[in-house]
Amino acid sequence: GAGLYLINATARIDSCLFNKASHQSVYAINSTVRIQNTEFVKTRGRSITSLGSVIRVNNTVFRDTINVNNTQGGTLGHSANTNAEYINTAFYNSNSNHSGGVGLNENSTVTFNRSFFMNMTTEFAAAAFSNINSQLTLKNCVINGFRVNPNNSTTTGSLISSGGTSALNIYNSTIIGSTTVLKAPIASSAGSTVKFYNSVIWKYGFNAQNVNAERDILTENNNNSSICDIRNSMLYKQENTVMTNSLIGINPKLTDMSNLFGPDGLLFTADDGF
């Protein structure tokens, strides 16, 4: 069952609260759904699951969400040629008992613009997103804090993993992690591509832990710019990679990570901590 089950429907959700939903909060099949000014809090299944639908989400918060089932995608699930766009959204403490703490994208096109992600965890891989034959774009986003259970060995990305023929595009975004996470934040398998433009990956912690850490971005061929295209960016560790106008291991000196929103309490303004 689901809180709101939509089939071949058009729905608008405005100024609503989904609190402690025990399964799927919104489940859409071949539908068009617009969600704005809404909160999903302590949901125990995905907040949004979409199959073959158009999803538009604006000014919405997802807080303390978890998928307790042994399936990918903790807060969101997009599949079957879903087209989804999230603008001005915030995700706090997204969790999955499998992988893809924020979301699973399968055969879909998904975009996040001006969105904030904090403290994502999974058991196996991809604390934020697991992509399968999908295009995922992050624009003007901040990701702060992610963790994969270190007891479960994985060769995929600790933050974002891409498989099949996926395309990951990251523009004007900041990714902040910890040196305790040794796996690559971004990992892309054969057939998938990564574009990383005007963005930052940085880790905090003891530099000694960096010795055994993987590169920040792993692809099928990091020396082929059609597969791994890094431009005008700053990375923590990224040897043996062709890059354009980019720096490695230079502290970006983020202002105040304890107060990311800054004195005005608003993200994406001049006083932000990142």
Image: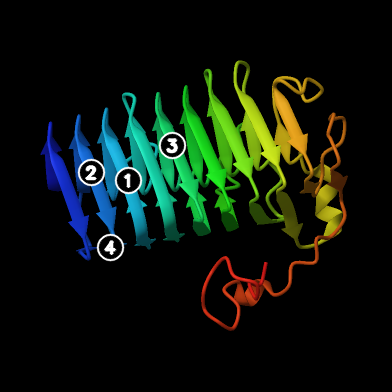
Q: CA distance from mark 1 to mark 4?
A: 12 Å
Across and down, in percent, residue 57 comes to: 33, 51
Q: CA distance from mark 2 to mark 4?
A: 13 Å
Which quarter of the image is occupied by the C terminus? bottom right
Say above or below: 250 vs 46. Answer: below
Say above or below: 212 vs 200. Answer: above
Q: Earlier in the sequence, mark 4 or mark 3?
A: 4
Q: Nearer the viewer, mark 3 or mark 1?
A: 1
Q: Earlier in the sequence, mark 1 or mark 2?
A: 2
Q: Are marks 1 and 2 in contact (CB under 8 Å)?
A: yes
Q: Amino acid at mark 1?
A: Arg
Across and down, in percent, residue 156 comes to: 60, 32
Residue in the image at 63% along x and 72% along y? 272
Residue in the image at 44% along x and 58% along y? 88
Q: Amino acid at mark 4?
A: Thr
Q: Are marks 2 and 4 in contact (CB under 8 Å)?
A: no
Say which residue label 1 marks: 56
Say which residue label 3 marks: 110
Q: Amino acid at mark 2?
A: Val
Say which residue label 4 marks: 38
